[in-house]
């Protein structure tokens, strides 16, 4: 299980997450910030839980590339 969390309010719109993990992230046309696809919002923290372990490498790269450190990736 891979758990991905995005603190969307702190996003600066650099687009690195979309470039590295396009199946999990996209940029909003409304405000230019990252969107974690198919996520649930809890007080500004957008989270998905995926049983697909094949996404782990790409989302980890996106986490490491994020200049404002707003992406969290956990493996359970």
Image (tube, helix red, strand yellow):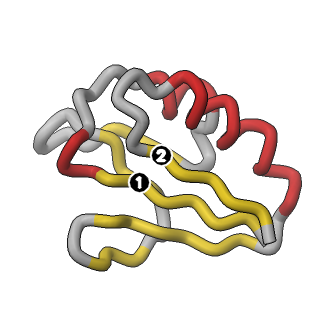
Q: Residue at x 20, y 39 (%)?
A: 29
Q: Earlier in the sequence, mark 2 or mark 1?
A: 1
Q: Nearer the viewer, residue 71 or 54?
A: 71
Q: Return the x and y of residue 5 as percentages of the image width and height.
A: 48, 60
**Which quadrant of the rendered structure holds the C terminus?**
bottom right
Q: Return the x and y of residue 53 as percentages of the image width and height.
A: 86, 59
Q: Residue at x 23, y 28 (%)?
A: 12
As displayed, is residue 12 above or below residue 56?
above
Q: Nearer the viewer, residue 17 or 44?
A: 44
| Image marks 2 and 1: residues in contact by CB distance under 8 Å | yes
Residue extending furthest left? 31
Q: Residue at x 73, y 65 (%)?
A: 2
Q: Which mark is residue 71?
A: 2
**Which quadrant of the rendered structure holds the N terminus?**
bottom right
As displayed, is residue 73 above or below residue 17?
below
Q: Secondary structure at mark 1?
A: strand
Q: Is residue 23 left or right of residue 15?
A: right
Q: How many marks?
A: 2
Dot 2, crowdedness within 10 Å: few (<14), some or many (≥20)? many
Q: Which mark is residue 35?
A: none
Q: Return the x and y of residue 45 as percentages of the image width and height.
A: 33, 66
Dot 1, crowdedness within 10 Å: few (<14), some or many (≥20)? many
Q: State the separation of the CA atoms marked 2 and 1.
A: 5 Å
User: Which image quadrant for residue 22?
Assistant: top right
Q: Is residue 64 left or right of residue 69?
A: right
Q: Is residue 50 left or right of residue 41?
A: right
Q: Is residue 20 left or right of residue 54?
A: left
User: Which image quadrant for residue 43?
Assistant: bottom left
Q: Return the x and y of residue 47 as percentages of the image width and height.
A: 47, 69
Disc 1 target residue = 6
Q: Secondary structure at mark 2?
A: strand
């Amino acid at each position: 299980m891979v758990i991905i969390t995005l603190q969307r309010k702190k996003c600066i719109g650099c687009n690195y997450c979309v470039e590295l993990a396009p199946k999990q992230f996209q940029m909003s046309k409304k405000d230019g910030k990252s969107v974690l696809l198919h996520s649930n919002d809890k007080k500004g923290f957008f989270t998905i839980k995926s049983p697909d372990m094949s996404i782990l490498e790409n989302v980890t790269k996106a986490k490491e590339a994020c200049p404002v450190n707003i992406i969290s990736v956990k493996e359970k």
